[in-house]
Image (cartoon, grey):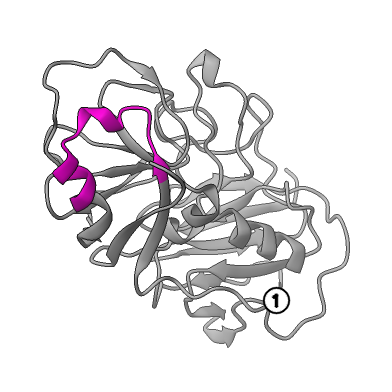
Amino acid sequence: MTDRALAVVRAGALTTVQDRGRPGHAHLGVPRSGALDAPAAALVNRLVGNPVTAAVLETTLDGCALRPRSAVTVAVGGAPCPVSVDGRPAAWGAAVRVAAGALLEVGAAVAGVRSYVAVGGGIAVEPVLGSRSTDLLSGLGPAPLADGTVLPLGRPYGLPARVDVAPQPRPPAELVLRVTPGPREDWFTPRALRVFTSRPYRVSPAGNRIGLRTEGPALERARTGELPSEGMVLGAVQVPPDGRPVVFLADHPTTGGYPVIAVVRHTDLPAAAQAAPGTPVRFLAVGRR
């Protein structure tokens, strides 16, 4: 048995393996998947000397605990959280050396939602369609981590970055999502379109990797009836029958039958990944109507 492995002592609420995902397979019904906060995942990879394509761990809210079988270099970033090695405080946002058999604890997020753990050499689970990402919708990739899971590690790529702490964006106090009109904007009343971009919403606790759900004023349709299923894209803002917008994230379905009122700019989606339940949300119209 190889000593290049990581044992999961505490899996946490939802910890998954993620890389840059598997784009380009939507025509096969396969979602993009990948790290929801891609810049955070890329940064922790750089801190341990990995290429940005290496697979990392994405935790949700309450972190995880890990025990390497050999000495490794790790970095934790994304949502700020306490980090410790065998009970002693360790750096967040910087490369940390963890001895073989030591316990690395990634604590609960003190702000934001998702923390990222990179290990030198990357998480070396078997790729599926070119990606090691866990996809909660299709079931592709490795299952979400469970206590006792053992993850293989790759060989280190290079030297870790020599920085004390790498600056990272703080999770949003208010989530501002810039949107352009969607293909089914005409399915909503003029009043609903005004409400959508002028009234505040909040992040719902019902969201997940598939979509960020919102709480707030319902959007009234101008048309009733059913919409045939059509292609969906990352950042699409779909409006289900309850009238509350849902922003599609990395594990979104490739088709859907509810009207899309708008599409969020991709550069705003990492902040959406870190918006905790209750965070105010504002949809900001950009471009022409």
Above/below status of 35 relative to 270: above
Give the image location of residue 31, x and y in percent: 49, 28
* Picture quadrant of residue 32: top right
Rate crowding at label 1 as few (under 14), some (14 to 19) or many (20 or more) other CA atoms within 10 Å: many
* Picture quadrant of residue 159: bottom right
The quadrant of the rendering that contains the N terminus is top right
Q: Secondary structure at mark 1?
A: strand
Q: Amino acid at mark 1?
A: Val
Answer with left or right where residue 131 lies relative to residue 65.
right
Q: Residue at 46% of width from left, 47% of height from top? A: 287
**Residue 26 within the magenta-colored segment of the rendering:** no
Give the image location of residue 107, x and y in percent: 44, 73
- Whether residue 47 is visible, yes or no, is yes
Q: Residue at 72% of width from left, 51% of height from top? A: 122
Above/below status of 21 relative to 172: above
Above/below status of 24 relative to 17: above
* Picture quadrant of residue 274: bottom left
Q: Residue furthest front?
A: 288
**Residue 181 within the magenta-colored segment of the rendering:** yes
Q: Residue at 60% of width from left, 62% of height from top? A: 40
The quadrant of the rendering that contains the C terminus is top left
173 and 61: which one is in front?
173
Residue position marked by numbered label 1 in the rendering: 96
Answer with left or right where residue 58 lies relative to residue 227.
right
Q: Residue at 65% of width from left, 33% of height from top? A: 131
Q: Residue furthest right?
A: 158
Answer with left or right where residue 158 lies relative to residue 256.
right
What's drawn in magenta, residue-wise?
180-195
Above/below status of 281 relative to 86: above
219 and 39: which one is in front?
219
